[in-house]
Image (tube, rainbow, N blue to C red):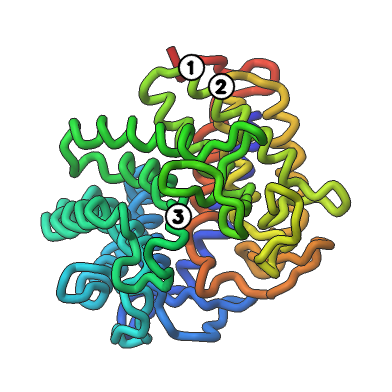
Amino acid sequence: MNHYSKLYKQELLENVIPFWMKHSKDEKHGGFFTCLDQFGNVFDTDKFIWLQGRETWMFSMLYDKVEQRPEWLDMAVHGAEFLKKHGRDAEGNFYFSLNQQGQPLVQPYNIFSDCFSAMGFGGAYKITGNEEYADIAKKTFQNILNRRQNPKGKYSKAYPGTRDLRNFSLPMILSNLSLEIEHLLDKSLIDNLMHEIIHEVMEVFYHKESGLILENVSPDGSFADCFEGRVINPGHIIEAMWFIMDLAVRLGDKALVNRTIEIALNALDYGWDKEFGGLLYFKDIKGYPPQQLEWDQKLWWPHVEALVCMAKAYAATGDERCQKWFDKLHDYTWNNFRDEQYGEWFGYLNRRNEVLLPLKGGKWKGCFHIPRGLYQVYKTLENVSVGQPEVNTLVK
């Protein structure tokens, strides 16, 4: 499958990254514009912290792992300096959004602002050696751990005690974040956290009857029969499975690798739109109408994360089911999301796979899932050929 590797590397370096290099940098006030239309024009100047952190990490990672291009280093430092100056409140919590000048717009209710800021500063430290970046990353990570049981804190809208729920998103992100900044953390902390996260994702949120991962469960891990408890996000499941697969490879746990693959394949089959193709955004595990009105949209990130998951699964095991799914996902994704004329990829399709919003970035989509996915696929498949995979070379 190394022909895919060359294609994905070319797409990353010649199409997607140049788009962000050209259009996203705010030379006047710092940070990045993410609200970019099809052509790269800025249609809103608000700055969303988790996208600032993600783009800072992205250019740090490219500089560290692909090539030491000065312009990538400049982008990473540009993002880190803006976040350092404007991103946090007095307690060190990262705001959700700022205006163009860096003044706060939305309070720090969303812990993922902190997660991706920590990731960005951890990446920036790796390529600059700037101890101030390391200090911010470590303090922010500890702050995240301190808030794990009550991520929104005083900003939560839920009435306490009536229907308390545990959400899948944070342990899922921590499974990846902990590896991304492990160069700054104590080894024992990482080792303990890895096992905690694997248990939480693979046992607490795992729904035995369906073989899927729930988005929300009751505090004791039991099924909550309500809108929030029944919702399934196939893309989240699949993304989480490659995160856990990375941990399993690190631990040399072949059984865990195989289990992540089975759950990912199950989620692909469950989430695939049998009528029009593509992954549905949300489903209700009991088949009831989903609460989310956007349930039938096809979004960029689940498809890209599924490509990464199937590439890693095939490289680790040689399972032909994974190769077939990768081919299917590749054809769908490249034919429907990629903008051959103006660069980068669209983010939102309707159920019939027509472009729903002709934007390349916004409040939720930035310089992250597409380039990270392209990088992961090209690196994973570099030395893997169909019929001659590196079967189980990654696991003991």
Which of discs 2 and 3 lies nearer the camera? The answer is 3
Q: Which residue is mark 2?
A: 258
Position of residue 133 measured from the top left corner of the image (x, y, whole percent): 18, 58
* Element marked by disc 1: helix
Whether pointer 2 and pointer 3 mark residues with C-beta atoms closer than 8 Å, the reply is no
Q: Nearer the viewer, residue 14 or 142?
A: 142
Q: Name the residue rendered at 66%, 65% in the picture.
A: 291
Mark 3 to mark 1 CA distance (whole Å):
32 Å
* Element marked by disc 3: loop
Bin the neighbour count of mark 2 within 10 Å (Cα to Cα): few under 14, some 14-19, many 20 and up.
some
**In the rendered view, does 289 fall on the left or right side of 142?**
right
Farthest residue, direction front: 162
Which of the 4 image quarters holds residue 296?
bottom right
Whether pointer 2 and pointer 1 mark residues with C-beta atoms closer than 8 Å, the reply is yes
**In the rendered view, does 297 fall on the left or right side of 162?**
right
Tag of residue 351? none
Farthest residue, direction right: 275
Disc 2 residue type (three-letter): Asn
Mark 2 to mark 1 CA distance (whole Å):
6 Å
**In the rendered view, does 320 fall on the left or right side of 40?**
right
Which of discs 3 and 1 lies nearer the camera? The answer is 3
Farthest residue, direction top: 396
Q: Which residue is mark 3?
A: 165
Which of the 4 image quarters holds residue 340?
bottom right
The answer to whether 384 is drawn above or below residue 354 in the figure is: above
Q: Which residue is mark 1?
A: 254
**In the rendered view, does 195 fall on the left or right side of 169?**
left
Bin the neighbour count of mark 3 within 10 Å (Cα to Cα): few under 14, some 14-19, many 20 and up.
many
Disc 3 residue type (three-letter): Leu
* Element marked by disc 2: helix
Q: Name the residue rendered at 66%, 40% in the picture.
A: 267
Return the disc, 2 or 3, that comes first in the chain's sequence. 3
